[in-house]
Amino acid sequence: MKTKAAVLYDAGKPFEIMELDLDGPGPGEVLIKYTAAGLCHSDLHLIDGDLAPRFPIVGGHEGAGVIEDVGPGVTKVKPGDHVVCSFIPNCGTCRYCATGRSNLCDMGATILDGHLPDGTFRFHSGGTDFGAMCMLGTFSERATISQHSVVKVDDWLPLETAVLVGCGVPTGWATANYAGGVRAGDTTVVYGIGGIGINSVQGAAHAGAKNVIAVDPVEFKRETALKLGATHAFATAEEAAEKVAELTWGQLADQALITVGTVDEAVVSAAFDVVGKGGTVIVTGLANPEKLTVHVSGGVLTLFEKTIKGTLFGSANPQYDIVKMLRLYDAGQLKLDELVTTKYTLEQVNEGYQDLRDGKNIRGVMVHAE
């Protein structure tokens, strides 16, 4: 069959809209018609060269849609099911899945290569195989993906909203609640109020943090943070640090959550300095893996028992936590509709990412044509 998709041919180049040939589902695979895709910063890392996928690649790793067909051996879903995609496939049987850490599933090792678990591709054009970002390629009208990449969700929920829980929402919420271990009465600082950071704010507030301090240079994002659970918001790390010292009588913060679009040494150092004794710094944002971005005093690390910890997907488990986020939303305990700033068509994908760069969006969502 044919499908229209947004494709990247190389770093430094915009998405190109083109028609591709799409193979149907084989064993363990499903054909999905995407309803919506999230414009997440991780795809921008491909353009900026911070992450190096196999090109050409169909973009998009946040997706929600309806299953149209299934291949032999598929047991998780059936045609007509509504699903949210997990950008990390989870097999359920590898060492990490079997010990409750499915965010680290071994299947995730090749998500930037763009092929399915069997090493083959489903998108093609002119004899060339096209990869799919995180084995999903949600910037396509349809895709053939592994059953290990889908999570069945309640069919009364709007997929244009539910799409956000495929990556950014649980990553941010769990960065606070799981990786960060925020507890009632804590003081938590969140650096970067984008698609992940705003949900770290929600997560910290949900956990009962006394002070939730948001740090972002964009006024619109600070205002949004204050509406969704932040107690204070500042444009700079210096202003935030001063307020943290005042609020805690010099004890400083319990957690510093780094959710900026691109992590650098400055934000890591600021986060390390803002936490007090026994404090934890969680690094959720990405940077080029070849760049060394953590430079702190080993003496202070030891004497103050501070912790610096990286986390993928906030250390959440996709099969459980994607459903959990939507149940919280359904109960009115998690804001999702308020996160969507602008909706785009497939043809507007480059405009959407420019808006992300310009700080105009908390979240942009691509809505596919019916």
Image (spheres, grey):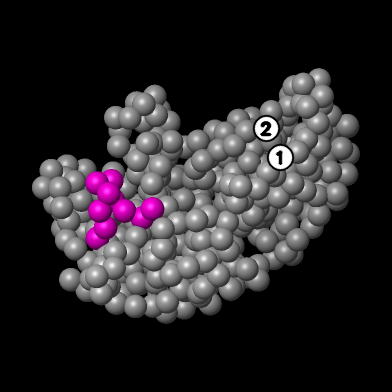
Task: Tell me which numbered mark, 1 or 2, is placed earlier along the sequence.
Answer: 1
Q: Which residue is more in the foreground, 256 or 234?
A: 256
Q: Position of residue 340 (x, y in %)?
A: 52, 64
Q: Position of residue 86 (x, y in %)?
A: 38, 48
Whether 27 is among the magenta residues is no
In the rendered image, the vertical position of residue 226 relative to residue 174, given as above or below: below
Left or right of 269: which side holds 150?
A: left
Question: Badge 1 is on which residue?
Answer: 294
**SS state under label 2:** strand
Boundaries of the magenta span: 113-122
Task: Say which of marks 1 and 2 sits in front.
Answer: 1
Q: Residue at x 60, y 30 (%)?
A: 181
Q: Residue at x 59, y 68 (%)?
A: 356
Inspect the image, locate mark 1, and give the three-letter code of the amino acid beneath it.
Val
Q: Quadrant of residue 359?
A: bottom right
**SS state under label 1:** loop
Q: Which residue is more in the foreground, 162 or 296?
A: 296
Q: For the residue carrying disc 1, how many other residues have a C-alpha within 10 Å: few (<14), some (14-19), or many (20+)?
A: some
Q: Is residue 366 visible in this depiction of the protein?
A: no
Whether 120 is among the magenta residues is yes
Q: Is residue 30 visible in this depiction of the protein?
A: yes
* Quarter placement of the C terminus: bottom left
Q: Position of residue 273 (x, y in %)?
A: 81, 37
Left or right of 225: which side holds 104?
A: left
Q: Residue at x 50, y 50 (%)?
A: 169
Tell me, for residue 284, which label it has, or none. none
Q: For the residue carrying disc 2, how many other residues have a C-alpha within 10 Å: few (<14), some (14-19), or many (20+)?
A: some
In the rendered image, the vertical position of residue 130 relative to residue 95, given as above or below: below
